[in-house]
Image: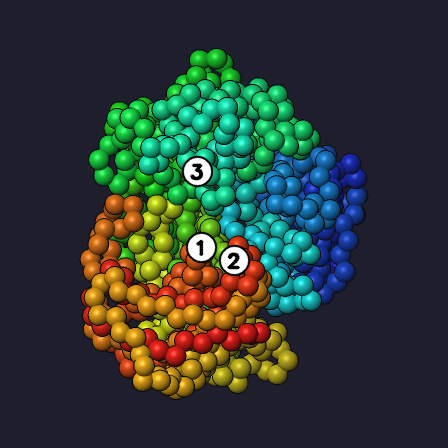
Amino acid sequence: MQLTGMVLLAAVFTGGNAEVVVSPGASDVTHYAAREVATFLGRTLGVGLVPVEKPTPGRSHVYVGASEWATAAGVVTNGLARDAFRLKVTEKDVYIAGVDDPAVNVEKTLAQGIWRQHYARASIFGAYEFLERYVGTRFYFPGDLGTIVPHKEAVAAGETDETVAPAFTQRSYSYRESDWFEGSVRKARSKELWPRQFLHAMRLRMETEHVPCCHGLNRFCYLERFRDSHPEYFIMRNGKRFLDETVRHKGHICNTSAIWEEIYQDVKAYLSGRSAVTRGLPNGNDPRNNGWKWNCAQGKYVDIMCQDGLLPCECEGCRARYVAGIDWGKELIWSNTVAVANRLKAEGIPGYVTQMAYTGYRAVPDTVEIPDNVMVMVAEKGPWSVHQPHILKRNNDEIAAWHKKLGRQVWLWLYMNKFAALEIADVPTMTPKCVGEYFAAHKTDIFGAYIESECERFLYNHLNWYVFSRICWNRDVDVAAVLDEYYRLMYGPAAADVKRAFEIFEAKWVDEIGGRTIDTPIGPMGNPPADVPLFRKVYSPAVVAEVEKCFADAAAKCPRDSLEARRVALMWREIAEPLVARARAFHGLMEHAAPTGQAKVLEKDGDSVRFALGACEAGRKYRVTIDLKLENVTPNTSRAANGGSTAASGGVTLIVSDGVSGVAMHPYRNVYVDSFDWTRIAIDFTASKKIPKGRNAVVTVRLASASGKAWADNARLSDGL
């Protein structure tokens, strides 16, 4: 044992004495953990290490997994919580052991679907803890450019004997929704990407047991099962039962109907071990998960959350149970949830039902006591609200109120995604400081979170996810230090320049783009600037020039062909360059505005004009250009879509459709306000498959929920972008 300064060093590993040991009878999961230790410890020490099945006397060992050697050292896995592991360092050796699934082959499973990724692998998590804490390995994203492997003559592990467990039992993000950054296959959701995407999540130590809570009632197929036999199970709209199966969010149920008996019997059947076929579910003979769909029932949990975009039923029974205000359904929906849970208890059926506090019933109910077999998830905007005090306070108060009501923690569904109005191509969404700031306010109220984080590029999120992963295992982590270390390890002499660029991206997104939010019936929705203010004010030419300078300076400071230089080049190519190109394209279009002198004028709220364009072929890409001029266009102050807080969301809108069915051909986010001279606007879209063959595209310009004056002219459709 050596004493160096004030640090007591125990096990010391060198290229000549290091050995990784795994029991020959250990599971493949445990063997995988041992291989990860050997690979990265060996790379750091400059030697090729391969796990062995018997220790060599006189060497320093890393024993991975439960074994006779771990037991002899007092390291046992009995009683460990899910994902927790034992870590012990003695004078010569390191012991890592957790509960591992005995049947899973890790390499094969990484190539399978997302639901296959939920299995016990605590020894793997222990391996990553050892590598990160003592070796200095960092897993920012897969591949050599995203993995930090330091080079050392020796690795010293300080003496410890501890059980390490995650701070959050539920910890996940949107794995597969973004295009990859390298290789021949990059398209989001490509099966070829699964091994890398799931490996990334595993190295960030994401959850191994999923608690489903996302509109679970959809997956019981009630509309398909009861549309004809029991139309009264579904909501009343305009005097008729709403039975349309073609709408996006179908099957809204009547919450005072007998469908809740069917819901209870489905829940009971699952938790009692019966097959879904016994309840008549479509595809109920699927042998996986006993025929039940994974995203509504897993393990001991059943999700009975309502349909998305909740619509109120207009029948007398439901209307009598609604309360005034934004959370009109809170007493009815939570009482139904509790009725299922209490009946399960009364009949001695173990398990849990899950329900989300969501738009229409997010607030704590006043008249319902919620038993401990109900798990509550709360949907909130999350980190992108940190600079919106009114929204942040309301959200935080809701979370605290649920904690107080239940007497136990909740978990969160958070929105950090480019969805609907926020589908703004080529604009980075890197907000790691906000992630840290947000979770710092919820150290006692929550046991986890899911971050919905779809966007077009994987690397937009890599730092958000990394910070989240650190918080998941240590609520008190110093996020500023984590970020400073990231910049230093990844970019070396260019750290300050890349940090400056990333902080520009964060400030712009949170303060001026993604942080602009209104409430809607399907959750918080972005209300960002359209492309004119986006590239004139937010990412103005001066700001874009500063981003370019940051990366030029960063590249100049890195030795040619070094890892740091390659990382700077990657971040420029994937994050900064698309933004710069988009800004230049906007200003290039603006210079070509050429009104014909026959502009159509919009002068009062509700005015609209249409421009007929050419025919569109389903699935093909097109661009519409139109010249606009605005004079003092100011949004009206109006109620948000769900009846909640006021929100100014009007202006001049542009919608490309077929002019008949009303099906939009592009994301609805083109809302223009203020004043500007003639400017050419471009709308890129892929023609919807719902558009009848040969139907002409039409661009509709409308002055909606706003005052002021606008002119529109010279609309054109171009093909083959």
Please give left or right for residue 649 compared with residue 137 in the image.
Answer: left
**Gap in Å between the C-alphas at discs 2 and 3?**
26 Å
Give x and y (percent) for residue 460. 49, 64
In the image, residue 11 sits, relative to residue 356, either above or below, namely below
**Which residue in the protein does label 3 denote?**
307
Mark in front: 2 vs 3: 2
Q: Earlier in the sequence, mark 3 or mark 1?
A: 3
Q: Earlier in the sequence, mark 1 or mark 2?
A: 1
Give x and y (percent) for residue 386. 32, 56
Q: Residues within 10 Å of mark 3 (few under 14, many from 20)?
A: some
Q: Is the residue under label 2 in contact with that under label 1 (CB below 8 Å)?
A: yes
In the image, residue 503 sits, relative to residue 226, either above or below, namely below
In the image, residue 455 sits, relative to residue 100, either above or below, namely below
Quadrant where the C terminus is found in the figure: bottom right
In the image, residue 374 sits, relative to residue 118, either above or below, namely above
State the residue in front, 348 or 442: 348
Three-letter residue code for mark 3 = Gln
**Which residue in the protein does label 1 denote?**
661
**Gap in Å between the C-alphas at discs 3 and 1?**
25 Å
**Which residue in the protein does label 2 denote?**
691
